[in-house]
Amino acid sequence: MNFDWLAREADAIAVLLGWHVALSVIPVVIGLALSLPLGWAAHRSGMFKSGLLSVTGLLYTIPSLALFVLLPPILGTRILDPLNVVVALTVYTLALLVRTVSDGLDSVAPETLQAADAMGYRPLHRLFAVELPVAVPVIAAGLRVAVVSNVSVVSIAALIGTPQLGLLFTQGAQLRFLTPIIAGIVLCLLLALVLDGLVLLTARLLTPWTPRGANA
């Protein structure tokens, strides 16, 4: 490790880290917001559930680099525009979380639903006050996978020049210099651990009634 190089490039690396955080987190937030109604629709769609989940699941099979290249002409953006990465990772997050939300709602015990109905909960009120809170551990598990996956996939956008930690990998490869590559790997791992921990902590705060370790 060349620590002198790290000291000189600290400001530039901090900027790349900031971009990496934004490009990893924003798609998760948008994807979660979109997956909640779609997951609920899949949960309630009966015989159409498997078809809907299969269609959304297929989105995850699209190669990320191909999606980064195909989106600019579709969106009318430049190839280097970070919006392309946000949209692509939102698609991947959606593909992961629709099934997760549906499975989470499926996990709510019928007795819980019957008790809520007996207490006079209307369907929408029951969804937000009972079903989604009970489904939080399952949804959080999928969210943790999506967050860590995004941290990794964002790096691929370095091949089209989008600013984030992946540029350290391409820079190191071009210069045959290991320090940027090692720094990028370490920062990606730390970022994934921090974001995963934040999701886990949020899940615990939202479900104080669950035993410790149930969300792990």
Image: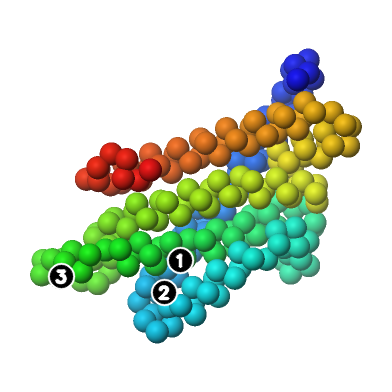
- Dots 1, 2 in contact, CB < 8 A: yes
For the C terminus, the image quarter is top left
Q: Nearer the viewer, residue 113 or 25?
A: 113
Q: Is residue 147 left or right of residue 80?
A: left
Q: Position of residue 170 (x, y in %)?
A: 81, 40
Q: Quadrant of residue 189?
A: top right
Q: Quadrant of residue 72?
A: bottom right
Q: Position of residue 19 (x, y in %)?
A: 66, 40
Q: Position of residue 184 (x, y in %)?
A: 70, 33
Q: CA distance from mark 1 to mark 2?
A: 8 Å
Q: Is residue 108 left or right of residue 55?
A: left
Give the residue number, with chain letter if any, for mark 2. 42
Among the two numbered marks 3 and 2 on one chain, the one whose residue lies closer to the N terminus: 2
Q: Which mark is residue 114?
A: 3
Q: Name the secondary structure under disc 2.
A: helix
Give the residue number, with chain letter if any, for mark 1. 99
What amino acid is at disc 1?
Arg
Q: Residues within 10 Å of mark 3 (few under 14, many from 20)?
A: few
Q: Nearer the viewer, residue 132 or 75?
A: 132
Q: Residue furthest top?
A: 4
Q: Is residue 169 among the parts visible in the rendering?
A: yes
Q: Name the secondary structure under disc 3.
A: helix
Q: Name the secondary structure under disc 1.
A: helix
What amino acid is at disc 3?
Gln
Among the two numbered marks 1 and 2 on one chain, the one whose residue lies closer to the N terminus: 2
